[in-house]
Structure formats: structure tokens, C-alpha cells
Image (cartoon, coloured by chain):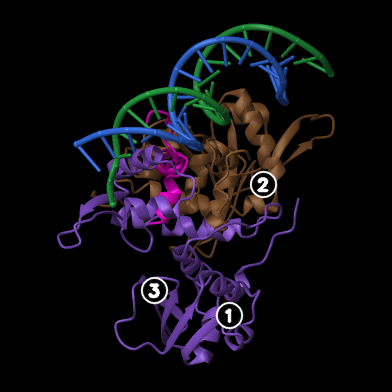
Chain colours: A purple, B brown, C blue, D green
Amino acid sequence: MTRTYGEGCPIALSLDIVGERWALLVVRELRLGPRRYRDLQAALPGITPAVLSKRLKELEEYGVLRRRELPPPAAARVYELTEWGAGLEPVFQALARWGVRSPVLPLTGEVSADSVMLGLRTFFAEPVADWSATYEVTLGREVYRLRVEAGRLTELARGPAAAAPDVLVRATKAAWQAVLDGADPLDDAVAAGRLSVTGDVDSLRRLVEAPRKIRTRAPAG
Amino acid sequence: MTRTYGEGCPIALSLDIVGERWALLVVRELRLGPRRYRDLQAALPGITPAVLSKRLKELEEYGVLRRRELPPPAAARVYELTEWGAGLEPVFQALARWGVRSPVLPLTGEVSADSVMLGLRTFFAEPVADWSATYEVTLGREVYRLRVEAGRLTELARGPAAAAPDVLVRATKAAWQAVLDGADPLDDAVAAGRLSVTGDVDSLRRLVEAPRKIRTRAPAG
DNA sequence: CCGGATCCTTATAGATACTG
DNA sequence: CAGTATCTATAAGGATCCGG
């Protein structure tokens, strides 16, 4: 931390730690679990290896993430958030909820599969209706498992569901995103085969409609 | 926005807008109301005029703040948050609550009077005990008014209380901060004259003790 | 004075190539 | 695979100056 705000304000302190370019996006990529160097590079289009290395080193020093060597046969080096680093979750939620209401800038560009799924957690924070179900969502090669209990999202993780889920979805990332955004009605997407659904479609409907109400846009000015 | 992340993720979008150096601290200084260029410069030690001008221009373009000319006799140019810009409040709360738990970096340096008072709002978000009172706090030349209703902080603004408040406090910024941090017990500070209190000391005690419980530190690692 | 703009220097990020 | 090394482009830091 050569360039520092050096204030006694906790906000300035946070920005000294995660306020540098790319830092918060590196952390974002670790929200759903450990990642390898090249996964991070792939998920952060435009970051250069030198900057990624530097950020990983700094964030490790500050205690936001740690480096861990997986034992053989995996034998990979991964980065994962510390407990304190995982505490940035409310910051991500707040930033996402604010950014989505931007009156001037559009929301265009690529989104990682992780981010699409995390959008669900961000905009579906409060219980909406009382239902419970387990889900497994496959987007390309990425698989996620979800659990809703009493209308509350209690689990969102990478990897397949442990037991047979109530609903099994397979789609492209774009198709899934279109349904979540409300651009593509669920029934249309299923009928046209853009979403392949096995199990209880009503539970899926509840899931994709849950986050909808938050996503409104602020007036300009 | 020359350097942009250009992602479809709302977090990346937010960072394109307020992620540049100094941007969020400029916004922070406007949380309690309009400020002049000069005030911002004074509140942001280390910022250069060129950078401040650039940030103000960008933040105005994005719709985070607006420039306004006060009519005579004030005849000053001030910057104030738009409604959307004020929507960054949850981001500040999340950052402050996270930063204060930093396991490695200490919290040292100067803090503006605004920030000290806003810390009260950040760490006293939920009702703690059931009481109501009005306050007027004078720190050096800065005066603030506060209102607690049913154990909830419902008003925090610059300027004196409209009607006679239940409690009137006068202190230096440092002395007030020491009491809020718990480093200086309220009774000691009052007895020694570091805090000059007029009115109901018990209501003041409730106020300064309300935010205490949040401020714990996370374990390192 | 206030509200900046200008000029020069230094630090950080982007681009590309390369190595243990 | 997981980074370094090198070079260039940009942005921030520091000081000074200018117009209303």
C-alpha cells in the first residue's frame, strides 16, 4: 500500500485495502469458493498477469484472501477468501443493488456464470413467498446447487446437488440470464427448449420471479 | 470513463462509476449535505485540485451528484448528491462495518467531523433500547442535530436543532470521538470537562453506548 | 479570497513476451 | 500452469498560476 488515504475513517481504510483497480473484482470471483490463477484471469477479461499477481499478493497480506495448495492428485494452487474477506458480501450486495439502478449507464457486456447466479442471491435477499425446494442449475460446464427454505435462499454453491433435487435446469448462461432478467418469460423459454427443465416447474417459477421486484431504475438527475 | 471494466455485472458497473481513486471519498463528504469545492478539498487531505475537478465532473455526468449555484447573498457554488447518489448509503455502511474489523491494518489518522458523526449512524443502525430524545452536538465550529425516536436514529444533519434539544453537547472532535470509541468513559469526560453537557446525561449515555456492540475485530488469518 | 486550470514529475496500469 | 520481465501509456501527485 504505497498510495494510501491514511485517514482514520473506516471507509477510507476499506478503500485502502480493496479500493485499488481490479481488487474488488478479484474478490468477487472468489465469492462462491476457491479459484485458480488462470480461472481468475479468464473471469476478469482485461486484467494483465502482472496486476493480478500484485492484487493477489496485496489482498493476501491484508488478510482478505489466502493461498492454498491442493493436495495431489488435484495438485493445484488456489486462492480463497478468509472469513474476514467473505465479510465483504454486504458490500457486493450494496454495490450491485445500486449499480443496477444507474440512470445513465447501460448494463452491457459479458457476465461470468458465477455472477449470474450470485445476482440471484443479491436480489433475492428477503423471503418473498413461503416455499421450499432444492435446485440444480447447469450453465454450460458450470453446475450450481441451490436450496430455498421457507421462501429464503439458504444455499448457493458450485457443484451438483448432494441428493436428487426437486428441479433440474440446463441452459446456456445467456438463456438463463434472459429468464432471470424477465426478458424471456419462463414458459416461452421452456417451450422453445432454451431452458431444459426436469421436475417441478412451479418451484422454478417462484425462484426466477423472486428477485424481480428489486430491479427497478432510478429517475435520472 | 476511459478505463472501464465493461462487464455486464452491476458490481463492475458501480465500480466503473465510483471505483476510481478518490471518487467514493468525494461522495462520502456529501453524505450530510452540499459542500463547496474548498470544503471538499479541506476534507480530503492529499487530493489535488486537478483530481478533485475531474472527479466532480465525472460524478456529475454519471448522475451521482449535481452542481448548484446558491443565490445571493450566499452566492456560492455547491455540490450535492442526487437521489441516486444518496443511494450509496448502504455501500458506505457496508464498507465502514467491514473496514473497522480489519485484522491487520490499524485505524489511525485524521477524521472529519462529518465522518465522526456519520459513524454514529453506521454503527447504530438497529434500535438498541427504547428511548427518544433530541440532541445538538457542537464539535469545534461544526454543529449537528440528532433525533432518536423509539431507540432509532431518525435524524442526523448539519446545523443546530430547531427547537431546544434535550441534550446539548460541546467538545473537541477528538474528545467526542474518544467517548464514542469507548476509550474515554462518558462520566470521566464530563467530570474532566472534556465534554460540556447541558441537559439529560442519561439520554446522552444511551446515545454514545448504542453503537458500541458492532465494533469488534475479526480474527486474523 | 474562491474555484479552479496548467505544467511537470512520479506511480500505476496495459500490452506483450517470456520463464521456472 | 503460474506467474515475471520489459516497455509504453495513462493517471495521479506536487507546485504554481490565473480569472472572476
Q: Is residue A3 magenta?
A: yes
Residue B64 is tagged as: 2
- Picture quadrant where residue B76 is located: top right
Tell me the kind of residue under disc 3.
Answer: Val
Question: Would you name the residue on which mark 3 appears?
Answer: A143
Same chain check for tags 3 and 2:
no
Q: Nearer the viewer, mark 1 or mark 3?
A: 3
Q: Which residue is drawn at 42% across and 43% down?
A: A10
The chain to which mark 3 is attached is: A
Q: Distance between the residues labelled 1 and 3?
A: 21 Å
Report the side of A46 relative to B69 (left or right).
left
Q: How far apart are marks 3 and 2 (CA)?
A: 38 Å
Residue at mark 1: A209
Cβ atoms at labels 3 and 2 below 8 Å apart: no
The region drawn magenta spans A1-29
Residues behind callouts 1 and 3 on a single chain: yes
Which class describes the residues within 10 Å of circle 3: few (<14), some (14-19), or many (20+)?
some
* Circle 1 SS class: helix
Q: Position of residue A1 (x, y in %)?
A: 37, 32
From this view, report whether residue B191 is shown above or below residue A191. Answer: above
Q: How crowded is mark 2: few (under 14 residues within 10 Å), some or many (20 or more)?
A: many
In the rendered view, would you say A14 is above or below B131?
above
